Image (cartoon, rainbow, N blue to C red):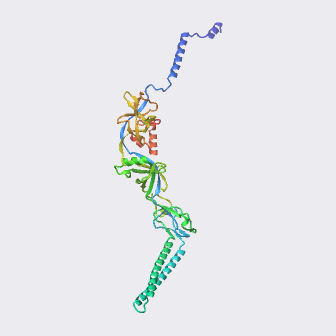
Amino acid sequence: MTRETVRTRLCPVSVPMSAFSSVAVAALFSGAAALAAPPGAPNGPPAVGVQPVGHQAVTASSDYIGRIQAVDRVALVPRVTAYLDKRLFDEGAEVKKGDLLYVLEQAPFQAAVLAQQGALEQAQSTVANAGINFARQKALLSTPAGQKQSYDNALASARGGAAAVISAQANLQTAQIQLGYTEIRAPVDGRISATAVNEGNVVSPSTGTLATIVTQDPMYVTFPAASRDVLSMQKKYQDVGGLSAVSIKLTLGDGTSYDQPARLDYVAPTVSENTDTITLRATVANPKRGSVTTAQSNDGVSTRELVDGEFVTVTVADPHPVERLVIPRAAVLSDQEGDYVFLLAAGNVARRADLKLGETVGANAVVLSGLKDGDQVIVDGIQKLHDGAKVSPGAPQAVVPDPGAKAAEAETMRTNGTGDDAAKQGGTAPAGGGQH
């Protein structure tokens, strides 16, 4: 290798300064542009979902917490002192009026009845003899042998004997009543509780309740309502029969709807001083469920859904639906001035509209004032809107759902039993909408 060749390989390549400056400036401006415009930044007005306001058939309702009560509740208490001889029922079973439930020791009371029967017969014999003597003295009184004193004595004896007979009859009746008290029978149809005293124990009126019977069908449901709600309902329904015209449905503790309607039949005459509520009461049927044989129905296991003392949700609704102006509840926002929504105005501008709302029905709210038929309410994308903002209107997101989520949404609605009202209204607002 020659010296010239080595020098040539070690000599750096010459690059013009003008070319280097152009590349550096281009790279610098490209980086600045990337920092100034992050990926995904919107290039126009925010997209919003718009839905027209309209009238729909609405059934207004209110929910209250109620308690199931038996129509009749009877405590079985012994009325005589005796040993408890027999218990003749299954604890927790349903019994019929007149069924024999307890038998107390009867022998002492049977003996008392026999003793009073003997006393009555003796009194009857005495009064019969006194009657014969009185008749004799009365006949002798008209003869020289008769004496007024003897006649008076005979009359007094006859009357005393009659009184003794009445007293003996009363004593016999009392003994028979006492004997009857040794059999304790069901005074009503119903379900009986567990016994408080077992066989072999001495019971008396001071012992207390042996068992309790509560009637099963029908049942009462009582619930407190604010006095202003009751007054409002009385005025609202005065033309259709008053409070008795309202529709009442029950929801059980597990969330299932009870299939028997209730009928309001009592309104308390006083208002609670502590809670400003009035107690209302409705009557509801409580039939047996399923096919149960006689043997199975008497084993102490209830086949009825309503139980005395159970808590339920009471829904008081209008008897008939009415046409009301409604909007999706998710479209409503609130601030210190009250409730409001954004309307789509001319030129695709969002305008605030203050409104007054009524009751909430499912996913919708009734509008009392502030809107009219045909107003275009923004229901999606309302989180960052302000009065006068430019928007890009479109269909509500729930009306044009994500195709990939359609099957999952249908399964959720089927499982939870929700979404029916929203489907009728054209869908629900997306998550993150304004809440009230």
Q: Is residue 305 visible?
A: no
Q: State the image coordinates of residue 81 (x, y, percent, origin top left).
A: 55, 70
Q: State the image coordinates of residue 219 (x, y, percent, origin top left).
A: 44, 57
The residue lying furthest to the bottom in this view is: 144
Q: Quadrant of residue 341?
A: top left
Q: Quadrant of residue 386?
A: top left
Q: Quadrant of the C terminus?
A: top left
Q: Residue at x 46, y 79 (%)?
A: 163
Examine the rendered structure and indicate whether residue 28 appears above or below residue 142: above
Examine the rendered structure and indicate whether residue 228 appears above or below residue 199: above
From the viewer's perspective, tell me whether residue 1 is left or right of residue 276. Answer: right
Most foreground residue, 218 or 66: 66
Q: Quadrant of residue 356?
A: top left
From the viewer's perspective, tell me whether residue 93 is left or right of residue 343. Answer: right
Q: State the image coordinates of residue 67 (x, y, percent, origin top left).
A: 47, 53
The number of discs equals 0
Q: Residue at x 44, y 39 (%)?
A: 406
Examine the rendered structure and indicate whether residue 152 appears above or below residue 209: below
Q: State the image coordinates of residue 223 (x, y, percent, origin top left).
A: 45, 51
Q: Quadrant of the N terminus?
A: top right
Q: Is residue 345 visible?
A: yes
Most foreground residue, 414 or 286: 286
The residue lying furthest to the left in this view is: 239
Most foreground residue, 280 or 373: 280
Examine the rendered structure and indicate whether residue 424 appears above or below residue 207: above
